[in-house]
Image (cartoon, grey):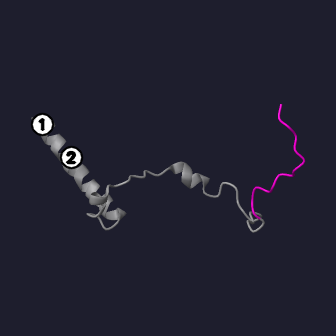
């Protein structure tokens, strides 16, 4: 059995944190949709200026892959 103490527990949050106007679940729907985060290695990241460039390159690669699979399936 634990010993009882007379010390009052310190508040979990500091006084300057004000959540009185907070909205519960404000971003829950967006979070539920999910995201796919991918970490690029440094040498690969240097090849692309931004996320859009990565996405465009992957879409192009996907198109090449689909065409190649169609050619191979036709043989």
Q: Is residue 6 magenta?
A: yes
x 31%, y 59%: residue:
42
Which of the marked residues, 1 or 2, is nearer the chain's N terminus? Answer: 2
Q: Which residues are magenta?
A: 1-14
Dot 1 falls on a residue whose secondary structure is helix
Q: Nearer the viewer, residue 41 or 22?
A: 41
- Can you say which quadrant of the picture contains the N terminus? top right
Q: Residues within 10 Å of mark 1 (few under 14, many from 20)?
A: few
Q: Secondary structure at mark 2?
A: helix
Placement of 23 over or under 75, stated as above or below: below
Q: Quadrant of the C terminus?
A: top left
Q: Residue 55 location, x and y as percent? A: 32, 58
- Residue 10 lies in quadrant: bottom right
35 sits left or right of 11 in the view:
left
Query: Please, which residue is most extreme toward the top here?
Result: 1
Percent x, y of residue 43: 27, 59
Q: Residue furthest right?
A: 6
Position above or below: 1 against 57 = above
From the viewer's perspective, tell me whether residue 39 is left or right of residue 44. right
Residue name at image x 85 percent, y 37 percent:
3
Residue 65 magenta-drawn? no
Distance, label 1 to label 2, CA atoms, is 14 Å
From the image, state whether disc 1 or disc 2 is nearer to you. 2
Q: Residues within 10 Å of mark 2 (few under 14, many from 20)?
A: few
For mark 2, what is the residue?
65
Q: Is residue 17 left or right of residue 60?
A: right
Residue under pointer 1:
74
Looking at the image, which residue is at 17% across and 41% down? 70
Per the rendering, the mark at residue 18 is: none
Residue 74 in picture, x, y percent from top left: 12, 36
- Magenta stretch, main secondary structure class: loop
For this rendering, which residue is in front, 33 or 50? 50
């Amino acid at each position: 059995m634990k010993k009882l103490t007379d010390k009052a527990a310190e508040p979990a949050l500091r006084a300057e944190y004000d959540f009185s106007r907070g909205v519960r679940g404000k971003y829950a729907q967006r979070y539920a949709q999910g995201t796919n985060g991918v970490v690029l290695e440094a040498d690969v990241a240097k090849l692309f200026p931004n996320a859009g460039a990565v996405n465009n390159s992957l879409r192009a690669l996907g198109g090449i892959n689909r065409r190649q699979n169609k050619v191979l399936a036709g043989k």
